[in-house]
Amino acid sequence: MATKMEELASEPAWTPVKLRAPQRSGLEERFAATDPTLELSRHPLVARILKNRKFQFLLILPNQIVFWTVISIGLAGTVDPGLNFGTAITWYVWFCLVFVMMVVVGRAWCAMCPFGGFAEWVQRRALFRRTQKALGLGLKFPEPLARFGFVLPVASFLILTWIEEFFNIAGPGTPAYTSWMVVGIVSAALLFFLVFERRTFCRYVCPLTTLIGTVGSVGSVAGFRTRDRDVCLSCKTKDCMRGSEDGYGCPWYTWPGSADSNLYCGLCSECYKSCPEGNVGLFLQKPLTSVIAPRRRRIDVAWGIALLWGLVLYQQFNATSAFAPVDNWLNSTLHFPHYPDPVDYLGFIAIGASIVAAVSWAVGRGFASRAVGFVRTGHFLDRSSRFRAFFAPVAYGLIPVVGADYFARQLPKFLQSAPRVVPAIEHIFGFSSTKSSLYSFSLMTNGWIVVTQVAVVLLGTAAAAWATWKIAGRELVPVSRNAIGVRVATVTFALACGAAAAFLYVLMHAAD
Amino acid sequence: MTAVDSPVLEPFAGRPVVTVLTDRCAGCQECIIRCPTGALTMDAARWVAAADSSMCVGCRQCVRTCPFSAITVDGPLQVAERVELEPRHPHVLRGDLSEIRPGFTTWREVLAEAERCLQCPDPTCAKGCPAHNDIPGFIGALRDGDAAGAQRILRRTTVLPDICSRVCDQSSQCEGACSWSLAGGVPVSIGRLERFVAETAPVAPPARHDGRRAAAAGMSIAIVGSGPAGIGAAWSLVEAGAEVTVFEKDATPGGLLGWGIPDFTLPAAVADRPWRQLQEAGVDLRCGVDVRPEDVEILLADHDAVILAHGATQPLRLPVPGNDLEGVTDATTFLHGARAALEQGGDPAAFLSRLGLADPAANAGRPVPRVLVLGAGNTAMDVARTARRLGLDALCVDWLDERFALVRPDELAESRHEGVEVRFSRTVTRLAGDGRVVRAELARTAQPRRDRLPKVLGGDPEVVDIDLVVMAMGYRGDPAFAPTLPGTPVRRTAAGLPDRRWTASGIMANAASAYAHHNPVGTLALGRETGLDAATLPVLDRVWVAGDALVGPSTVVEAMTQGRRAAESVIAGRPSRPGRPRQRVPRRVLVCYESQGGTTARAAEAIAASASAAGHRVRVLPIGRVGLAELAAADLIVVGTWVEGLVVAGVRPAKAMRAWLDGLPRLGGKAVAVFCTFAVAPKGALPAMRRTFEARGAVVVAQAAFGPRERRASGTFGPTAFGSELLQRAWPGERVAALVE
């Protein structure tokens, strides 16, 4: 039996603390499908790396060096975007690699991101040390805005993309514009990190967070999760959320004890470092698990996917020959003589998102069981309705095809121009020019590039069809009158989306 | 707390509305397990918290405890008005020592106030109370009409409920940390309820456990000082069956309780109660014995342990010109003399005459003598209010801003009501007079922030005529003890990250409530914890220190609790004086380590397994989780680290271990063993660790370095063999496993 002194050592004010028992019922059903079993951090070397406070710093540092180089060379280097290191590395290589990382790992980019990384160094007043006092105001992100979850960063992505299209930044166009865009993102990140607590910027504002979060859920890294959920529920300190001497509280507002997808795990390893029980691990999962398995479907994620789908459709359409007359007519009618016209930009996005919503509504209308009730009150994230019950699963099912479409969009730049990075690096040191053989060397011909794009989209389509079939079976069948009908209808829609995207790539090639 | 002092807090309009931000709610249930009313449950499908606003009372415990700020509560506090009692000010102040602050006298009042308590599952009030009284527990018993049950609950953590309920500054302790207070409302009147319990079901005398099975049977303990810390220690020890001898330098016991707190705050009958009961229980009280530092060795020869609780008795004096003039005295001298003068049969005129003052009663029509009290803390108020009862005028000056005053808010209000003039943001720059002080020059000060010392401003000083100066700016420990007691006084500030058990309760989240006069109650409470933990560790071999002697001037409840903690540590550690056979009992072994790749952790586990096989109680912890409490709860501390540095140069304990060693407290006489793991050579790592422990008074009984060869299962002297060896060295000849079987 423990002595009084030992009791004091375990709980200073021991007598009066009579916490309610945490709810454990429903745990098994809620998390069984999403709990990964393959733990990467069981390997001693991985464990040692993850425990080291320099882990994330060393991930960020190379990117930090590259991005400050991008800023300086973009401003001070040659105006030829193909020969300027800033534009070449950013648009020919980086953006494509980010998608590869997303599809394979998840939020790998977030773990090494120089924007948030730099701002976090300033906020923490340390490169890797655990400091106790943050720089800045440490405010909570306003609740009325936080309620919209992923919709807010989608909005910032749409705005940034419009600006990028307006100035032809990613074309790539004038290298200085790329630098100013990077400076703008770093400045915004710094501002948010100094005003708000944790990684509020990354969670609620970063233009890439929705794209990386949703497309990343295809990936095979489940992120940091609990080893034993019971230990987490019994934990009296929740150091993974509040921070300990060894690690910060989760910067992403995620608790390993309840994480059911890799959506919000920034792979920073702080929870792994701070857990006093050693109950957190880095887990792997089967591809698509975070798309298919989570039982909680977030409506903000669903709308985010629909809007992103609208945006990529717009980008494909405007590269076809059929789009030019429409755009010209709108420009002359609206007296906005510049590409992209905001009306057709937003219009196309709205149409793309609306198609997803309308099909979901129609499927719900056609198949929903009348016995199921829904909650129509509450805030944006909390309401439920027949439309939402169908829209969210359908949108989640589209994640692979949307991700594949974005990836395919980046392929031409990579396959045609990635070798230009070599002369661009040489040009920094003054001995290269557009006459370099690598400057005009392509990894593939245009024809093969289109084939590759279509193949990527078809692969994404197949994944989307399979994911939709599984999701519909788990979530739509129980609320539908016709189990086969609802599955066939939703899978058909996923296939149609993929086919449309693939067809557009063919049309885009024809326009070239 | 009077109605005058309670801040007026306007409630919001409407009912409380709880909103869970489901985007950020992680379903950790920190709010649910702490919600007093059960208004929060889990939405199992989405795994987020769900709120039922109709059950919410607006206490906002959930808001304070949510790690991700995912919950908000808007609306009024659903709580009845506090039952307030007005102070009983006498019509004629002079010579009247009757108690000013009333307590509850009827069950109706008690039940009305007790019903306001939320019975919080993680009560912040209990953390705010230095004794960690089970406040919801005793209030719950009162609700059931069970005063005796309430007394039993209080008795687990305090032996002075009648005294603490009168003298504690509840606004910066339990009541300041009450959920209602942290939510911006008026807290439950915990102090008055505690007093009602103490008056309705008085504290029973110590229940002495005699016989061989008593926890401290056969032990003889000397306690120096009979104040609150001495009382707390003596009570616990005598109940555990120890022979207790208490040495008090004054003629009567009680220390500060006896002479320092006037009767109008703490009636003598209440203050005398503990010592009456302790003496009846067999405590050997020896008054008039002044134990000096050099006497400690003599006490150790005759007793198994010594607890030094001699207080902080040296008054601080303001270093200004004229402080040595006649008519300048200190609070101790004044209060001692005034107490004797005002009690029945005393002679106030003679006392005033000794101070060089004319008795105002015998000199009607002449100006009333004016006492300048330097300081405006609780002692200063006691001096000023006592002066008023002697018929004198009193002026208190303090260089602190009134917003950050150290005085109890109700005491300040009562003092002003009794005619004491209190001026904050002033300091004395000069005392003047021809042989005897007659004037003081006061300068203005400015203190914009609580954590900054005030600055003395320039300009012409204000001159005030005075007849007596009493310095009541605080006390310090006897400097003669400083060389004997290294490391004291202990600073009551918690360094680094707050313990997350405290953060989780919400006490740290919203400390600056209006009721607590914007005192950071959580930070104060956590700081006090440092003192309580320090009391559990011996400063020298078989010597513990508690109370003001340990931490400098503190409060009655803190000193009492420290005394109890020191006594519990003595009982658990079972020290023996030379010649007395040690008891063969399972020891408490703490194995702590700093490990990076797991090698040192495995060595620690092997050592622990060895100790455990020998029948001892063993804990294995990384150093990050070893605080004062863990160190105190160990008879043998085994510390291990990996070593860093180049192969041949700069080899030393790992950086985290060095930082941990630097922060170690005194470990007087504690048995310690050190080990390290290395790849090539340990070099100076072990001697460095050894030196650190020895400098803190610990006894290093064994050391070992484990290279790759020793760590192998077939190694010649591996961690397992070291575990057995160090137990033999710590307690030669003891084979506890056989004893346990």
Image: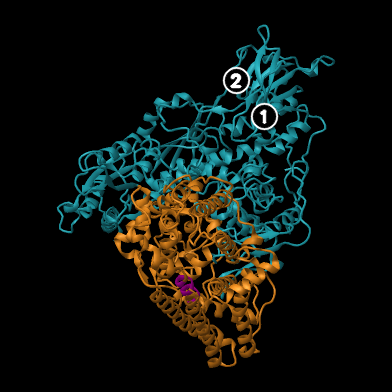
Chain colours: A orange, B cyan
Decide which of A74, B424 is in the foreground and name it: A74
For disc 2, the neighbor class at 10 Å (few under 14, some 14 to 19, many from 20) is some
| Residue B519 coordinates in the image, percent (x, y) | 63, 42
- Chain letter of mark 1 equals B
Which residue has dot 2 on it? B318
Image disc number at residue A1: none
Same subunit: marks 2 and 1: yes
* The residue positioned farthest toward the front in the image shown: A435
Residue A337 appears in view: yes
Decide which of A52, B525 is in the foreground and name it: A52
Give the side of residue B437 with respect to residue B256, left or right.
right
Query: Which quadrant of the structure image shows residue B601?
Result: bottom left
Magenta span covers which residues?
Answer: A401-408
Residue B63 lies, with reference to residue A288, above or below; the image says above
Residue displayed at 51% across by 48% down:
A123
Q: Between disc 2 and disc 1, whose residue precedes?
A: 2
Give the side of residue B28 with respect to residue B10, left or right.
left
Which residue has dot 1 on it? B376
Give the side of residue B350 with respect to residue A224, left or right.
right
* The residue positioned farthest toward the right in the image shown: B365
- Magenta stretch, main secondary structure, is helix
Considering the image in quadrants, where does the N terminus of chain A appear? bottom left
| Residue B668 coordinates in the image, percent (x, y) | 36, 37
Decide which of A462, B720 is in the foreground and name it: A462
| Residue A405 coordinates in the image, percent (x, y) | 48, 74
Amino acid type assigned to the residue bearing label 2 in the image: Leu
